[in-house]
Amino acid sequence: MFPQPEESEASSRESRFYLMKHKWKWLGALIFLIITGWWLYATARRQGFRWQTFVGTLEGLQVHWLVVASACAFVTYYIRALRWAVLIRPVSPHPSMRGLFVATVIGFTAVTLFGRPGEFVRPYLISLKEKIPFSSQIAAWLLERIFDLLIALVVFGFALAHVRSSGLTAGPALSWVLTFGGRFVGVMAAISLVVFVLLRHFSEPMRRRLLDGLAFLPAHRFARAERLVNAFVQGAEATRSELSLLLLTIYTVLEWVAIATCYLCIARAYGDTLHFGWTDVLIFMGFVSFGAVIQIPGIGGGVQVVTILVLTELFQVPLEIATSLALLLWFIMFVVIAPLGITLAIREGLDWAKLRSMAREAEL
């Protein structure tokens, strides 16, 4: 059980402070929605969006493939919990797998409900459940992001290389991605590897340099900063074990295999309408994975838009089918887990207000 929400007046003050602090993020998200909404409207108007075709596509879906896709989506959450157990071994050698799975499901539900600030609900819950420093869980979260980003970059690089060699023609909306994609992949991969190497091999020198740089702080503030830095470095020690590094790699690959299988099953649900093989799925997933970076609370955002864009511009899929697949993909990958997450949150003594408060508190 977790502590109950704060009083409404304090919560209201926190909400106003949160909105003011993040107003530029919300403005950017709004601009993104306006631009992409205009593009979708212009495309639909140009092509003559056929609602009858859209509804008929949904009615003709093969449900058994959607059930398998949903099962694969659920498997990814358990794999993420297994990977997190490896990440926190330095600070919690024997974590509760049930607790990690519950926190993972609730955390991803928070992402669906509140957008990117919900990312911090999971490490926050795990720090409470395992009674370990929250800063150590931020280190675990950072390492998890690095592993996922490296795999995403590999898949995206494969997509770029295959598109260029296979003769697939990208429309004007994707041409800039193909033009600058290679440089982007190289720069992001280099940054990720540098951060990973620093955390793995030079965590102690980094710790000393950080503490030396904070030496000007008053004694009580320096003591708090020292605890935070030590917890963060300790949380990053999981990568220093060869066995842990191997397990992290295996779990990350398994997670992405499950995600790719989910994508393939969704495509198969369309029967003869879509003829996607594994190569097509990897190309598709490589582009779409970066759309997930933009997450608007409650409605997603980037995933749906990039899905429609890639399907129509690269694979020449009709807009109606692309739109239905985008909504289906978002629903299975992000929304299906929400009822279970809300149920688990209630059983843990949480509610909507408390989850929102956790998202704000963790990010602040």
Image (cartoon, helix red, strand yellow):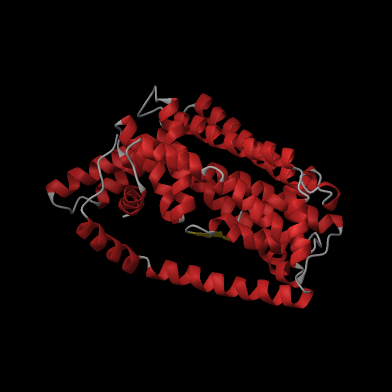
Q: Nearer the viewer, residue 124 or 15?
A: 15
**Residue at image coords 32%, 62%:** 18
Residue 198 visible in the picture: no
Q: Residue at x 69, y 50 (%)?
A: 285
Answer whether residue 282 is visible to the viewer in this image: yes
Q: Residue at x 63, y 59 (%)?
A: 304
- In percent of width and height, residue 122 lies at 41, 42
Which quadrant would the C terminus be assigned to in this image?
Answer: bottom left
**Nearer-the-camera pick, 169 or 44:** 44
**With respect to residue 311, does 23 lie above or below?**
below
Residue sitting at the far top: 94
From this view, report whether residue 335 is shown above or below residue 78: below
From this viewpoint, which residue is outermost toward the left? 219
Residue 184: x percent and y percent?
A: 62, 60
> Which residue is at a point 35% across and 29% down the rendered structure image?
91
Q: Is residue 345 above or below residue 53?
A: above
State the image coordinates of residue 72 (x, y, percent, origin top left).
64, 36
Q: Nearer the viewer, residue 351 or 92?
A: 351
Q: Quadrant of residue 73?
A: top right
Asked if residue 180 lies left or right of residue 242, the reply is: right
Residue 319 relative to residue 137: left or right: right
Q: Position of residue 320 (x, y in %)?
A: 75, 63
Numbered disc total = 0
Identify whether 20 is placed above or below 317. below
User: In which quadrant will I find the N terminus?
Assistant: top left
